Structures are given as C-alpha cells and as structure tokens.
Amino acid sequence: MAGLIKGVLARVEEKKEYKVDISVVVPLFNEEESVPELYKRLKDVLDGLKREYELIFVNDGSTDNTRQVLEDIFHGDNRVKVIELRMNFGKAPALSAGFDNATGAIILTIDGDLQDCPEDIPRFIEKIDEGFDVVSAWRMDRKEPFLTRRLPSLIANWCIARLSGLDIHDFGNAYKAYRAEVVSGIKLYGEHHRFIPVLAKNIGASVVEIRVRNEPRRHGQSKYGLGRIPRVFFDMITMKFLLTYSTRPLHILGPIGSFFGLIGVFLGMRLAYLKIFYGDVLGTKVSLSVCVLCLFLAVQIITSGLLAELLVRVYYESQGKKTYTVRCKLEHDT
C-alpha cells in the first residue's frame, strides 16, 4: 500500500503544470535608475528564447522612485508582476516573495543593479535543459574593490564550500536558475539566500556552476560592505548546524555540555582535595574557576542562539507564517 501511495504521489508531481516556462525574479532596493535598462535587456533576451515567461519585480521597501518606475513598466507589459513589500526585509525574504508568486517551471533570479548581464540567461537555461536542477553563476572578473568586497567574498565562499561540501566558488551572487520544484520546498530566513544551492543539494538536487560576466555598478550605491562579515560568519554556523544537527541537536549539545561538565567536576574535586589535605586557600584558583565559568556561559549563549534558530522555524512553519508582508501586488488577469 505504501508503495502504491508513493507511486501515485510521484505521478501527480510529474503532471504538475506551470503557466509559463520561465519566471525571472528580481529583488530591488533603491534601483530606480537601473530598472528601465534592466527591464529592456531582460525582455530582449527572453523574447529571443521563444518561450513563455514572466518578470517578477520585488520592491523590497525602496525609498526612492523605484515603485513608480515599476508601476509604469507593469502597465505596459502583461507579463510583468510587481510585488511591493511594506518595508526593507532583506534579499532572502524578497526572493521568497518572488518564489511564492512565480508560476514558471524554471525560476531565475538576478540582482537589479545591472552588474550581472541578462545576456547570459540562455546559458542558464541550457544547463537546466541538460538536466541540472540548480545553475549557479561564478563572477570570474568582479568589478568591485578588492579589500572591501572581493577579499571578504573569497574567504566566505571558501568557508561555505568547506562546511557544506558543495564545491562552487560564488555563493553570494543572486544570479542563479532553479527548477521550480526544487525551491518550492525551501524556506529562507535571515540572509540565507546565499545558501540556496546548499539547501537544494541537501534535498538531492544536482548543482552546476557556470562562469558569467560582471560589470561595474553604474547607478546608486552598493548595499553591502564590511558590516556583512559577522552576519555571514554566524549564518555559516547556523547553516552547518541546521544541515547536520537540526534533527538531532543533542548530538552536538550533549558532547559540549559533557566536556565542560567533566572539567567542572575535575576542578571541583582538585580544589576539594587541596583544601582537605593541604589546607590550601583558594587564592588564584578562584580566578581559574571564574574563567571556566565564563567559557561555559559563552557556550551556553551560542548554543541557545542555535536553538532559537530552530524555534523560529517552528514558529513560522507551524502557523503557516511568512518572513515578509506584502503591501500590494500588481498582477494581470489571466
């Protein structure tokens, strides 16, 4: 019976129909000068593919004129959707909003700053057609400052690759393509958009990387700087924990607690022995105990943070909540 049910579910999944072939999701924050050119270039490239498509622009709480520019584009093209978020939630929630509203069999994401070339889109589609589930872009010649952008990115990408076991070079770039069924089951929190390929690999998806062009920013200011380094570091710890220990947290918390517990017992027995047999005054040993206590508190705080990550997921997913709220949505009737 179980096998029969599984077979029926598999056939239902295979028959799932999509309204269009390609959905392009573009998260935007204060990109009013870039949007018109980006829209034109995306439209030209996608028209050349001779496939049905839709463009989904997610305005992530922009404070400039991005909203009006998007509304003008929307009224002139029935293949355009505009998702207006109430405030700046961040790239991961903005991408989630795009994924939730996409109706394409293939979902492609691209930043709105014109640094990624829309003309590379056919290469992503070719790889999906070859059978890959996720196609990730690798910016070989990045047009950005080395110390503040490229060096931190190189270090972060190397660390993520080592921790995740996924050998790609550019996790932070949003320029990627996915089969819709792959991202439909992925929930994004915090700034975990850079880990989508890792999450996809964790559910059995095949991932490939292609080299793409990168252009210098021509309009506006970069939204990223050195301040993102601590966030990326803690995101890496969280992701490693969730991928490895999310269903068995005691396997990591147990040994840590046991280790510090044994140290505490050993120090307590040693201090008691010295006091009983030698009348030794605690003196500097009090300082040692305080040091051990501080280390223990540090571990407690870190592990409590990891447990809080799990509780956040339980809170949102058990109640069907999302990590963003939509102010309004412009969508053509079909």
Image: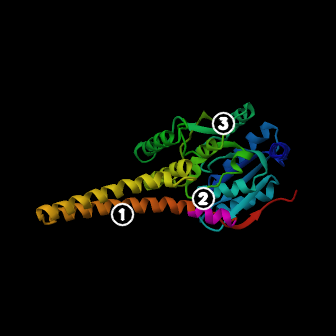
Residue at image location 58% in from the left, 63% down from the top: 312
Q: Secondary structure at mark 3?
A: loop
Label 1 amino acid? Answer: Leu
Residue 258 vs 68, above or below: the answer is: above
Distance from disc 2 to disc 3, alpha carbons, whole Å, reads 31 Å
Q: Give the main secondary structure, helix, strand or loop, of the magenta stretch.
A: helix
Q: Which is nearer the N-term, disc 2 or disc 3? A: 2
Left or right for 139, reference 276: right
Distance from disc 1 to disc 3, alpha carbons, whole Å, reads 41 Å
The one of 140 and 89 positioned closer to us in this rendering = 89
Label 3 amino acid? Answer: Ser
* Residue 287, percent from left and from top: 21, 63
The one of 118 and 87 positioned closer to us in this rendering = 87
- Find disc 3 in the rendering and name its residue: 206
Judging from the image, the colouring scheme is rainbow
Residue 267 vs 145, above or below: the answer is: below
Q: Quadrant of residue 85?
A: bottom right
Q: Quadrant of the C terminus?
A: bottom right
Q: Which is nearer the N-term, disc 1 or disc 2? A: 2
Is residue 225 visible from the viewing direction of this image? no
Q: Secondary structure at mark 1?
A: helix
Question: Magenta segment, which residues?
Answer: 311-319
- Find disc 2 in the rendering and name its residue: 29
